[in-house]
Image: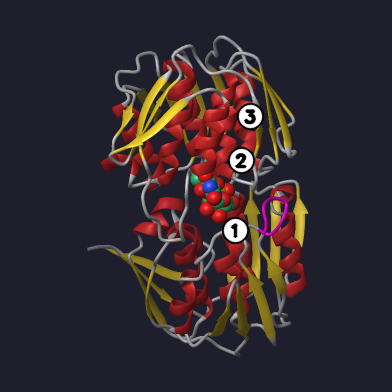
C-alpha cells in the first residue's frame, strides 16, 4: 500500500491549479443514464472515485470514452468523458460495486426514471457515522415508485413511469436532493422539492440537466421546481471547480505561511471558509484567475466554527480546519452538525502532539506552538488530508499510511504541493 512521506517546515509559495469538483463529477456522470444520447463532460478530475464510477456505469452497459490531451490543453486540465447510455443492458447495481462508493447508490434515480426498474445494493457501512438512505427512498416513493428491500438490495419499480409530486425533506440532504432532482426530470407533471440542499454541486447538476432538456428552476435555493419532460438529450458540460480542494489548500497555506494562488478557484463557492481563514489571520484576495492566499509573520488566531449545509461552513473542511487550529494562539471550538462520529482525525492529530478534547459534537482545540511529525494513518478522505496539512507544518518527518483515501478525492496532491516548495513524496508498495 502506498504511503506519503512529508518533511514539514517549508512555507508554500507558487500556484496550485484547482481541479474539477469530485462531488459534481460523480452525479453528472450518473445523470448520463437519463438519456440515450451522448453526454460530454469536460474538466472531470482524474480520481479513484471517478474511475470506480466508470466501472459501475460500465456494468450497466454505458460506453465511456476518455479523450487524451489535445494540443494547447493546460497541463492540469481535467479529462473529457464522452458517456453514452444508448443501451442499458443491466438495471442492477451489485453489492461488490456499490459498497466501494456510496454515491453509486444514486444510479437508482435515473434507472427508475428511464427504465422504470432498478435493483441497487444498499451502500452499507461507512467510516463517518451511519449514513442512511431513508430520505432518498422517501423521495422516490413520493414520485410513485414502489420500493422494497430484499437481501440487502433496494428493488424499485414504477411500471407506468414516475409522477411529479411534492417532496419536503425533513433535513437538508445533498444525496436526497440529487436523487429527487434526477428522478423528477422524466416524471409526468411537476415536482416541487422543499428544504432542498443549496450546494453549488446541485446547481451544477441542474445546469447540466437543463442543457439536456430538463425544466428545472430554483436550484441553489431551498425550493426547486421541476417540470417533467418525456425525454432528455445529449449535451456538453464543464464540471465546476472543487471548492473543497480549494479550501483545503487555502488551509494548508494558512498553516505553513507563504503565498499561493489557487488557480481557477471561485470565491463565491467557499465564502464561509474564506471568512474563517481571514479571522484566523490569513489574507484572502480574490482575483481574475482565482484566489490568492497569504499568511506572513502573524500567528494563527483561534476560531469558533459550526459546520452547516451550504452556504455554511462545509463539513468536508472540518478536519482540515482542526489541523490548522492545532497551532492557533489559544483555544478553538469546532462543532460538527452534519455527520455524527466525524472526528476520527482527532486521534491521529494527537500523534502530532495536538491537544484536542471532545465534548459531544464539539471539539475543543488548545493550540500549541509546534506540531511534531509522526507516523499516522488515514481513515477517510477529508480526515487524511488534514493529516497532510498538519505534516506540512510539523517539525520533522511524517509518514501518512493508507493513502488510497487521498487518491479518491485529491488529484495529484504531491505534485501540486511539491511545486509550491513542500517536501512530499509518495512511497509505493
Ligand atoms: C455529500 C457529499 C459529502 C458531504 C455531504 C455533506 C457527495 C458525493 N458527497 O454526501 O462529501 O460531506 O454531502 O455536505 O456529494 N441523511 C439521512 N437520510 C438520508 C440521507 C442523508 O439521514 O437518506 C443524513 C446523513 O446521515 C447526514 C445528513 O443527512 O447526517 C447529510 O447527508 P447528505 O447531505 O445526504 O450527504 P451525502 O450526499 O451522503
Residue at (72%, 38%) from the top-left corner?
220
What SS does tag 2 mark? helix
Q: Nearer the viewer, mark 3 or mark 1?
A: 1
Q: Point out the stretch of residues depicted in magenta.
A: 308-313
Q: Which residue is mark 3?
A: 206
Q: Is residue 20 visible?
A: no
Task: State which tag comes first along the sequence, 2 or 1.
Answer: 2
Report if the CB atoms under discs 3 and 2 are less than 8 Å apart. no
Whole-angstrom CA distance, mark 3 to mark 1, is: 23 Å
| Quadrant position of residue 189 | top right
Q: Nearer the viewer, mark 2 or mark 1?
A: 1
Q: Give percent across and percent down for residue 135.
A: 54, 41
Task: State which tag comes first along the sequence, 3 or 1.
Answer: 3
Residue at (69%, 61%) from the top-left corner?
273
Report the front residue among 333 and 351: 333
Report if the CB atoms under discs 3 and 1 are less than 8 Å apart. no
Q: Give percent across and percent down for residue 416.
A: 49, 58
Q: Which residue is mark 2?
A: 201
Q: Is residue 215 above or below residue 306?
A: above
| Quadrant position of residue 261 | bottom right
| Quadrant position of residue 54 | top left
- How crowded is the residue under tag 1: few (<14 C-alpha within 10 Å), some, or many (20+)? some
In the rendered structure, find residue 338 and report the number of the disc placed on it: 1
Amino acid at each position: 500500500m502506498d504511503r506519503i512521506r512529508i518533511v514539514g517546515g517549508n512555507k508554500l509559495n507558487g500556484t496550485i491549479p484547482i481541479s474539477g469538483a469530485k462531488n459534481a463529477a460523480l452525479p453528472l456522470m450518473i445523470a448520463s443514464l437519463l438519456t440515450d444520447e451522448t453526454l460530454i463532460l469536460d474538466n472531470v478530475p482524474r480520481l479513484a472515485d471517478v474511475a470506480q464510477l466508470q466501472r459501475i456505469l460500465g456494468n450497466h452497459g454505458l460506453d465511456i470514452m476518455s479523450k487524451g490531451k489535445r494540443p494547447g490543453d493546460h497541463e492540469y486540465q481535467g479529462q473529457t468523458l464522452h458517456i453514452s447510455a444508448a443501451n442499458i443492458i443491466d438495471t442492477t447495481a451489485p453489492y461488490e460495486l456499490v459498497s466501494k462508493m456510496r454515491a453509486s447508490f444514486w444510479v437508482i434515480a435515473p434507472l427508475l426514471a428511464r427504465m422504470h426498474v432498478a435493483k441497487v445494493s444498499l451502500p452499507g457501512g461507512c467510516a463517518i457515522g451511519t449514513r442512511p438512505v431513508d430520505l432518498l427512498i422517501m423521495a422516490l416513493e413520493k414520485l410513485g415508485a414502489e420500493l422494497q428491500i430484499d437481501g440487502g438490495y433496494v428493488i424499485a419499480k414504477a411500471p407506468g413511469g414516475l409522477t411529479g409530486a411534492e417532496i419536503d425533506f425533513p433535513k437538508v440532504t445533498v444525496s436526497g436532493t440529487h436523487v429527487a432532482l434526477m428522478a423528477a426530470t422524466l416524471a409526468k407533471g411537476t415536482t416541487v422539492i422543499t428544504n432542498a440542499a443549496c450546494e453549488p454541486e446541485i446547481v451544477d447538476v441542474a445546469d447540466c440537466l437543463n442543457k439536456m432538456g430538463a425544466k428545472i428552476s430554483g436550484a441553489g435555493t431551498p425550493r426547486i421546481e421541476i417540470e417533467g419532460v418525456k425525454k432528455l438529450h445529449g449535451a456538453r458540460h464543464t464540471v465546476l471547480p472543487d471548492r473543497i480542494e480549494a479550501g483545503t489548500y487555502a488551509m494548508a497555506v494558512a498553516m505553513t505561511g507563504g503565498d499561493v494562488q489557487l488557480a481557477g478557484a471561485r470565491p463565491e463557492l467557499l465564502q464561509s471558509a474564506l471568512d474563517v481563514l481571514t479571522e484566523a489571520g490569513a489574507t484572502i484576495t480574490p482575483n481574475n484567475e482565482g484566489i490568492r492566499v497569504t499568511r506572513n509573520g502573524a500567528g494563527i488566531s483561534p476560531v469558533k466554527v459550526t459546520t452547516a449545509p451550504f452556504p455554511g461552513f462545509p463539513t468536508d473542511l472540518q478536519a482540515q480546519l482542526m489541523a490548522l487550529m492545532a497551532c492557533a494562539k489559544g483555544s478553538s471550538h469546532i462543532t460538527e452538525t452534519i455527520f455524527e462520529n466525524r472526528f476520527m482525525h482527532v486521534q491521529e492529530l494527537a500523534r502530532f502532539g495536538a491537544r484536542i478534547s471532545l465534548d459531544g459534537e464539539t471539539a475543543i482545540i488548545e493550540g500549541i506552538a509546534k506540531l511534531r511529525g509522526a507516523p499516522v494513518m488515514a481513515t477517510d478522505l477529508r480526515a487524511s488530508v488534514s493529516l497532510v496539512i498538519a505534516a506540512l507544518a510539523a517539525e520533522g518527518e511524517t509518514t501518512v499510511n493508507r493513502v488510497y483515501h487521498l487518491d479518491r478525492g485529491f488529484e495529484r496532491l504531491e505534485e501540486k504541493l511539491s511545486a509550491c516548495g513542500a517536501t512530499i513524496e509518495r512511497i509505493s508498495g
